[in-house]
Image (cartoon, rainbow, N blue to C red):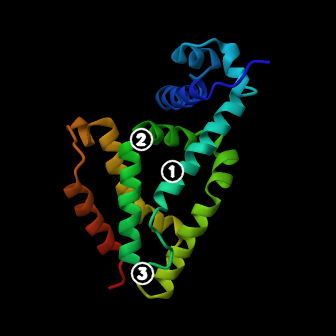
């Protein structure tokens, strides 16, 4: 039996995220991944049973890393404006530092793997976010609303900016360059929309 090479295993993970992010799940194969890594297909099977095992293992690990980064310095008991600011800072920082993970996560959301990965990887994260929203309502910082409404207003604008940044263009193909000024200007508008009058 061949020994696992951790350097090669990390290369496989990075290239899998890149290939999956660019080509989606339909265009992904173990052969394409092996070629992108410069290794034999047989080497991939040292690390993963099959394509599904590879995708689920890598996706779960990446979602857990992203969740840990997003929750860094965050406490669900924080005042609403402060906690939301930490969330925006952490989310933007992680996604800008790891644009390939952002593309990969988008592919996951619209794939059949979504149901097997997100409930497991997001459990602690979802609990923290749920407590944060409930505390904000309890403290009369925001009005009660369905979670989907809250999420769309609180984070939708941020993810739109990050998508523009990844693509290097915005609406109508206009060139777009992400900046802290744009980030916090958008954040202020989101806070105005959510904060209790």
Camera sees residue 112:
no
Q: Position of residue 189 (x, y in %)?
A: 27, 68
Residue located 64% across and 24% down the image: 5
Q: Residues within 10 Å of mark 1 (few under 14, many from 20)?
A: many
The part of the image, by quadrant, that contains residue 185 is bottom left
Instruction: Kindly report the distance in space between the C-alpha atoms of the residues bearing marks 2 and 3.
Output: 32 Å
Instruction: Kindly report the distance in space between the C-alpha atoms of the residues bearing marks 3 and 1.
Output: 26 Å
Horizontal relation, residue 184 to residue 153: left or right: left
Q: Between disc 2 and disc 3, whose residue precedes?
A: 2
Q: Position of residue 158 (x, y in %)?
A: 36, 56
Q: Between disc 3 and disc 1, whose residue precedes?
A: 1
Camera sees residue 64:
yes
**Label 1: which secondary element:** helix
Q: Residues within 10 Å of mark 2 (few under 14, many from 20)?
A: few
Mark 3 — residue?
A: 142
**Quarter of the C terminus within the rendering:** bottom left
Image label count: 3
Which numbered dot is residue 66?
1
Mark 2 — residue?
A: 98
Residue located 53% across and 29% down the image: 20
């Amino acid at each position: 039996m061949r020994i696992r090479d951790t350097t090669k295993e990390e290369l496989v993970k990075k290239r899998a995220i890149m290939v999956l992010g660019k080509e989606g799940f339909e265009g992904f194969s173990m052969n394409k991944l092996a070629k992108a890594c410069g290794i034999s297909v047989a080497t991939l099977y040292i690390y993963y049973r099959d394509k599904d095992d590879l995708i689920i293992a890598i996706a779960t690990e990446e979602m857990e890393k992203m969740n840990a980064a997003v929750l860094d310095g965050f406490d669900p008991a924080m005042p609403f404006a402060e906690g939301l600011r930490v969330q925006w800072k952490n989310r933007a920082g992680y996604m800008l530092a790891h644009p390939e993970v952002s593309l990969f996560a988008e592919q996951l959301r619209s794939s059949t793997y979504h149901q097997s990965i997100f409930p497991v990887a997001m459990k602690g994260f979802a609990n923290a976010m749920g407590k944060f929203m409930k505390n904000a309502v309890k403290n009369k910082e925001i009005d009660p609303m369905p979670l989907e409404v809250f999420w769309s207003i609180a984070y939708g604008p941020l993810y739109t900016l990050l998508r523009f940044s990844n693509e290097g263009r915005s609406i109508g193909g206009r060139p777009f360059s992400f900046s802290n000024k744009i980030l916090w200007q958008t954040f202020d508008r989101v806070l105005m929309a959510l904060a209790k009058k």
